[in-house]
């Protein structure tokens, strides 16, 4: 199933772009652990899946990686390295390490009062040191790069004038304006129509191949993982319970929870087929 | 935007019509005979009946309403029984004093409420947040009458920092040449800085009395709106991409929070307009609220009716302005639904 993307297999182990080691996150109020000892790696050009049920800590892992843990949640252990260099104490990993992120609800993730072109341009100016005019041109060209037909027109639109799928394309264009080395995609298709889901995923895969950036794809959908990911990490109640190449994990899951996930996914598929 | 504006304008107009009807009906439904009240306890039934006929009170209610509306269209709001002067003159000549006071109160409410609300939101759960919230509870639960008395006692009687409650200017100071009727503004326009200073000092305590209560409402709304934007998706996006914190605060969060805060400001204006009856009385402020208070005492229904109408129209007009500002800030309102 993952045979569509064999290229990354050869490069990935040599230079981990991002390595998370022993990440621990707790809720400050109760001291309850949210993540315990989560470690994973992403190589350039590689798409790494992070799956688990809701509440398993998938999103917290991505927030911690971006350095945007919400209020009341604190990182207590673990380090982040980029190209082998420790960036745990770097405040702004987006700018310094060229990390970008797209979210589950694309429209909510955009400022409703700003034209989408301005929102992308401001990120381009920030990350690439562009002038206002350059950044605006960059925004239009990034919008066209994510296959929005009339970039000029789309740049002038406000988020409420765009569909959910278009908003996610805008978010991807914003990510591209960082010239990202790592893209964290947190449930990027969950809130979208089924028909749009596949197109957004195709776009992510296409841009990964073009730019050579690494992708951490957070999802609860094993079907998505099977189609797009090279490697897979399974998170269960804040613990990383299984990790390995997608083919191997899906064919021979070692952990009970992974087996359970697979079974429920298969059941769903069966009922879909029968209907 | 034009369609939105026309719609808001139409709604405002309908509201004004409703206001006129309600004010008219409430005054008619109230127990008591306006003619009897005007003539006093000595009057004979014949006198009362004669006056009723002259005032049109013996006519059916829709005829009275027709007369009333016809008068309004000509700018005639009836005659104030207590003074014998036209209601419109009585009220409109005092409108600038009321506007000056309400504007002062609004200014204080915004200058206090906004920074404190933002401070409380950014320091949520800490001591300064608790202090700001305590201020909000005190400010919103203290009656203007009581607060005004405290301020007069503390800042005039004890500390002597501000002039006593004797109106817009100290006794003996001539008012500035009237251009707008707002003493502070007229003083500035005519270069009469002494009047500016004196009238600002006289304005301080009544405006503070009105403004402190209103600032509590602004504070609470700014705080909760800013907290809501803290967890919003667009804030998360901006933070994730390393947008500087000050830009996230001013450009993303505050502008979005403004949408809710504007609603609070509309309500605060209502409070400022309604609260002025007591405050103007307390500070001998020669505004509309002051004569409305006197009209209550002298059973002058025509004057009260006119007061309710004018305050209502001002309130509707200001809320139309608030709607306008909504449209300016929010493209979802300005542009309507999907265009692309």
Image (tube, grey):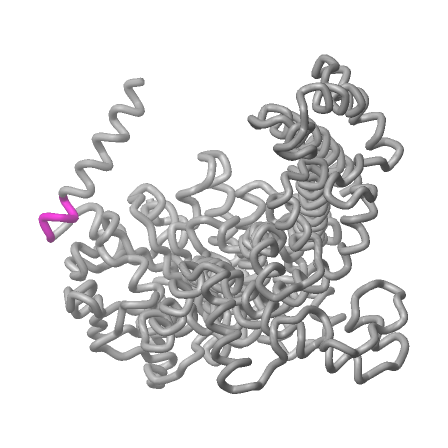
B24 or A86, which lies in front?
B24
Magenta span of residues: A255-259
Specify whether residue A176 is in view.
no
Q: Assign the magenta stretch its main secondary structure.
A: helix
Write down the quadrant of residue A194 in the picture: top left
The C terminus of chain A, quarter of image? top left
Which residue reaches farthest left? Answer: A256
Which residue lies at the image location 37% right of the left edge and 45% below the top edge? A227
On the picture, is A221 further left or further right than A28? right
Which residue lies at the image location 61% right of the left edge and 28% below the top edge? B26
Please state the total of marks drawn on the protein image: 0
Specify whether residue A264 is in view.
yes
**Above or below: residue A168 compared with residue A127:** above
Which residue lies at the image location 21% right of the left edge and 76% below the top edge? A76
The image shows residue B78 at horizontal and vertical percentages of 80, 35
A85 or B270, which lies in front?
B270
């Amino acid at each position: 199933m993952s045979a569509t993307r064999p290229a990354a297999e050869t490069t990935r182990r040599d230079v981990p772009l991002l390595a998370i080691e022993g990440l621990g996150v707790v809720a400050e109020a109760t001291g309850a652990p949210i993540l315990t000892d989560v470690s994973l790696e992403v190589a350039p050009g590689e798409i790494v899946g992070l799956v688990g049920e809701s509440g398993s800590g998938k999103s917290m892992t991505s927030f911690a990686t971006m350095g945007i843990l919400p209020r009341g949640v604190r990182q207590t252990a673990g380090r982040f390295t980029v190209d082998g260099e420790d960036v745990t104490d770097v405040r702004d990993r987006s700018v310094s390490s060229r990390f970008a992120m797209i979210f589950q609800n694309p429209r909510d993730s955009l400022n409703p009062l700003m034209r989408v072109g301005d929102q992308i341009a401001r990120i381009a100016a920030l990350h690439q040191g562009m002038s206002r005019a350059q950044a605006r041109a960059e925004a239009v060209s990034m919008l066209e790069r994510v296959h929005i037909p009339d970039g000029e027109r789309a740049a002038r639109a406000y988020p409420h004038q765009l569909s959910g799928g278009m908003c996610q394309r805008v978010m991807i264009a914003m990510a591209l304006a960082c010239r990202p080395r790592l893209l964290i995609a947190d449930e990027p298709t969950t809130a979208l129509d089924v028909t749009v889901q596949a197109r957004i995923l195709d776009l992510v895969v296409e841009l990964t191949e073009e730019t050579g950036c690494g992708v951490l794809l957070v999802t609860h959908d094993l079907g998505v993982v099977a189609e797009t990911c090279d490697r897979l990490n399974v998170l269960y109640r804040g613990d990383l319970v299984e990790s390995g190449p997608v083919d191997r994990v899906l064919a021979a899951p070692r952990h009970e929870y992974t087996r359970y996930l697979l079974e429920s996914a298969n059941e769903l598929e069966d009922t879909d087929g029968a209907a | 935007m034009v369609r939105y504006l026309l719609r808001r304008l139409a709604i405002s107009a309908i509201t004004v019509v409703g206001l006129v009807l309600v004010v008219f009906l409430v005054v008619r439904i109230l127990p008591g005979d306006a003619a009897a009240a005007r003539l006093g306890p000595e009057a004979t039934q014949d006198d009362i009946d004669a006056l009723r006929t002259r005032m049109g009170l013996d006519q059916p209610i829709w005829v009275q309403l027709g007369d009333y509306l016809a008068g309004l269209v000509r700018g005639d709001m009836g005659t104030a029984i207590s003074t014998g002067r036209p209601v419109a003159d009585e009220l409109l000549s005092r409108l600038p004093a009321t506007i000056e006071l309400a504007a002062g109160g609004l200014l204080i409410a915004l200058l206090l409420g906004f920074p404190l609300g933002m401070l409380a939101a950014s320091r949520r759960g800490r001591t300064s947040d608790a202090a700001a919230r305590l201020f909000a509870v005190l400010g919103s639960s203290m009656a203007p009458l009581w607060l005004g008395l405290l301020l007069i006692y503390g800042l005039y009687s004890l500390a002597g920092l501000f002039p006593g409650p004797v109106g817009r200017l100290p006794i003996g100071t001539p008012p500035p040449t009237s251009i707008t009727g707002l003493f502070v503004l007229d003083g500035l326009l005519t270069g009469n800085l002494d009047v500016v200073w004196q009238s600002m000092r006289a304005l301080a305590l009544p405006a503070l009395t009105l403004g402190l209560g209103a600032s509590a409402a602004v504070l609470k709304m700014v705080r909760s709106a800013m907290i809501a934007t803290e967890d919003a998706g667009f804030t998360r996006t901006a933070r994730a991409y390393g947008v500087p914190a000050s830009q996230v605060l001013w450009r993303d969060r505050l502008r979005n929070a403004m949408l809710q805060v504007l609603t609070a400001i509309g309500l605060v204006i209502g409070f400022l307009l309604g609260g002025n009856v007591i405050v103007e009385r307390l500070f001998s402020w020669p505004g509309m609220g002051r004569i409305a208070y006197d009209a209550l005492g002298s059973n002058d229904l025509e004057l009260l009716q006119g007061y309710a109408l004018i305050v209502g129209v001002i309130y509707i007009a200001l809320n139309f302005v608030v709607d306008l500002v909504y449209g300016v800030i929010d493209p979802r309102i300005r542009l309507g639904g999907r265009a692309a």
